[in-house]
Image (cartoon, rainbow, N blue to C red):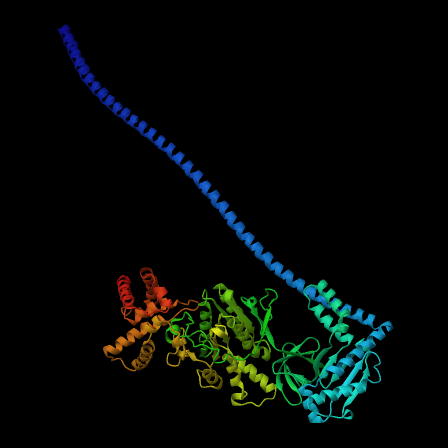
Amino acid sequence: MGGWNILYALINFAILAAGLFLVGRKLAVQMLRSRREQLSEDLEKAGQAAEHAKELLAGMEEAKAAGEQERREILRAAASAAEAGDQSAAAEDRKAAEQIAGEAEKDKQIRRRVARSEINAQAAEEIVEEAAALLSKTEYEPARAALTEQLLSRAERELRITKGDLAAFRSSGSIDAELRSAVLPPETAETRIREAVCRALAEAGQQVEPQQLRVRVIRDENLIGGACLRVGDTVYDGSLAGLLRRAKRRVAQADNADRELIDSLRELLGQTSREPDVYQTGTVISVSDGICRISGVSDAMAGELIEFEGGVRGMVMDLEKDNVGVVMLGSYERVQEGQRVRRTGRIIQVPVGEELIGRVVDALGNPLDGQGELHTVHSRPIESPAPGVIDRKSVSVPMQTGIKAIDALVPIGRGQRELIIGDRQTGKTAIALDAILNQKGKDMICIYVAVGQKESTVAGVVDKLRQHGAMSYTIVVCASASESAPMLYIAPYAGAAMGEYFMYKGRDVLIVYDDLSKQAVAYREISLLLHRPPGREAYPGDVFYLHSRLLERAARLSPEAGGGSMTALPIIETQAGDISAYIPTNVISITDGQIFLETDLFNAGVRPAVNVGLSVSRVGGSAQLAAMKQVAGRLRMDLAQYRELAAFAQFGSDLDKTTQATLHRGDRMTELLKQEQYAPLEASDQVIAIFAVNEGYADAVALEDVGRFEAELLPYVNERAPGLRERILAGEKLGENDVKKLRDLIAQFVESFS
C-alpha cells in the first residue's frame, strides 16, 4: 500500500512537472517572442535613428560648409567695407588735412604779408635816412640848387590860382605865398614868385599889383634838396624830401619788396626831370567826437577823402566859408590841433567786382572774414547819380522771395524798392534772409548790408547763409554797432556801389539794407556834432535826401544802359507799430510799397506776420506770375474780410452759415500762409497750394493738419502733372485743362488723405 502511494506521488509529480514545463515553455516562448519583437523594433528604431543621424551629420556638414562659405563672404565683405571705410576715412582725412593746410597757408600768407609790410616799412625808413644823408652832402649842393631853379621856372609857366584861393583873395584882398628851399635861393626868387602869382590872378580875372602880395622866402634844410612853394592853400612840392616820402609810401605798400625797392630807387634817381607834386593843404583847427574842423583846403569837395599825418583818413561832410568839417574814418587819437592835412582829390570809393562775392567786408571794403586780402581791380565812388528815367525800364520780371504771403499778396519785381517795416523782433530780417536763400540757382547777386547790429548777430547771419549755400552768390557788408557813426552812415552807400557794378554789367542784384533806421540815427549824430540845426525829432532837414538818394539807385535798366537790375529791400524799425513816425513816413514815400509786420500777429503765431491791410506793392503786380495772379487775385480781399469777421465773431456766438464758412476757410488759408524760416517755396508749389485751399479742398482738413496736407499734396500733384511747374514758372496762365487736371488730382488726393 505504501508502494502505491509512492508511485501515485511520483506520477503526480511527473504530471505536475510536465504541466509546469509546458506552461513555462509557453511563457518563455511568449516572452522570447515579445523580447525579439521589441528588440527588432528597437533595432529598427536604432536603424532609423542611425539613418537620421547620418542625415543630421550630412546636414551639419552642409550647414558647416555653408556657414564657412558665409563666414568667408562676411569676412570678405567686412574686409571690403573696412577697406572702403579706410579709403573714405583716408579721403576725409586728406580733405581735412588739405583744408587745414589751406587755412595754415592762408594764415602763413597773411603773416607773410604783415611781416613783408613791416620789412618794407623798415626798409623804406632806412632808404629815406640813407638817401637823405647822401643827398645832404656838400658835393650835391649845385644839383640841389638846380632843383630850386627848376621849380621856380615851372611856377612862372604853370602856376594857377584855384577857385578857393581866388575867393579868399577877394574876401581878404591879399594872398600869401611862401617859398621854402633847401639851399639859399637866388635873390630874384621873391620877384619871380610875385610876377607868377600876378599872372595867375590876371588869368583868373583879378588884376593886382605885385606889392599887394605877401611873399616869404625861407631856407629849410629839412627839404634836403629842391624847394616847396605854397600859394594860398596849394602846394607845389619839388623837394627831395617830398620825393623820398612818396618813395617810402610806395615801398611800404608794395607786394614784392625787392622789385618795388629797386623800382622806387630807379624812379627816385630819375625824378628830377618829373613834374612836382601839386596838392592843397590845410590845418586842423579842432577835433572831438570823431569830427575834425580844418582851415584851408578851400577847394575840397563834399565826400572827398582827406589825409592826415600818420595815414588816418577822413571824409568831408561840411563845407563852410572859412573851414570844412571832416568825419574821421578810423581812430583819431593821434590827430591834434595844428597838424597839416592834404587833399587827395578823390571822392571816397570802395572796391567792387567778382572778388567780393562770398566775402564779409566793412564799409570801406576791407575784409573782415579772415580769408585773406582782397585783390580787386575796380572801384566805385560810394555816392553816384541814380539812373535817369530814359535809362530805366518798367518793372516786369518777378523777384520771388519764396514766401507765400509775400509772393501772393505783396509781389516784388526786379528793380523794385520794397520796404520791410515793423517793430523789433517781428521777423524783418528773416524775410530778407529767406529772399536771399530763394535766389539760389537764379543767377542773382545778393548783398546784405548790416548797419548797427551786434557782431555776433551778423556772424549768425553769415553762418546761416553758409549752411544753406548762399554765400557763393552773396556779399556781406558789416558796419557793426561798435563802429563809429561815419562807418554806419556810409555802409549802405558802399553796398549800393558794389551792387551797381553788377547792375551796369547786365546782372541782377538783390540788396538788403538792415536797417536804415540805424543809419538815420548815425546821420543825426554826425549832423548834430557838425552843429547842423535839428528839425523834427532832432533829425536834420536833409534826412529825407539821405535815403532817397540811396534808394533811387535801385532800378531796372534798359538794354541800352546795361540791362541789369538792382532790387532794394530796405528795413525800417518802428516803435510800437507807429508807421506815421518821421523816418518811416519818409521811407514809405520813397519806396514802391511796404511789407508791414504786425506784432500781435507775430505773437499769435502767424509767421511771417504780414498785415494784409497795411502791406502794399505799387508796381510788383506787373511782375507777378500770371498763374499766381490768377489764383490769388481775390486772396487779399478774402483775408481782409476774414480778419474783420474774426474780430466781430469774438463778441458773438450766433453766426450764420455763410459767416461760419468764411471763417472756416479763412482759418485754413491763414494756416497755409504760415511758413517756417529758411524754407522758401518754389512759386509753382505756392500756386498749387493756394489753389487747393482757395477752392475749398482743405475745408474738411483739421486745422492742425493743414501743414501736412500741403507737404503731401505738392509732391503728389507734381508727380502726376509733369510740365505744369515749368509752364507756371514760364509765366503762363492756368488753362482750362490745367485747372480741370488740378481739381481732379487734388480731389483724388483728398480722398486718400487721412
Whole-percent x, y for residue 158 in the image: 73, 82
Q: In which quarter of the image is residue 396?
A: bottom left
Q: Which residue is drawn at 64% across and 76% down?
A: 330
Relative to 148, residue 58 above or below: above
User: In the depicted view, which residue is nearer to us: 577 or 381?
Assistant: 381
Q: Quadrant of the C terminus?
A: bottom left
User: Could you say where residue 428 lies in the image, as x and y percent from the top left?
Assistant: 45, 75
Answer with left or right where residue 616 lies relative to residue 256: left
| Residue in the picture at 40% in, 37% down | 67
- Image coords of residue 386 (percent x, y): 52, 79
Q: In which quarter of the image is residue 289?
A: bottom right
Q: Which of 51 and 227 is in front in this view?
A: 227
Q: Quadrant of residue 615?
A: bottom left
Marker count (numbered): 0
Q: Can residue 275 be seen in this view?
A: yes
- Can residue 606 be seen in the rendering of this structure? no
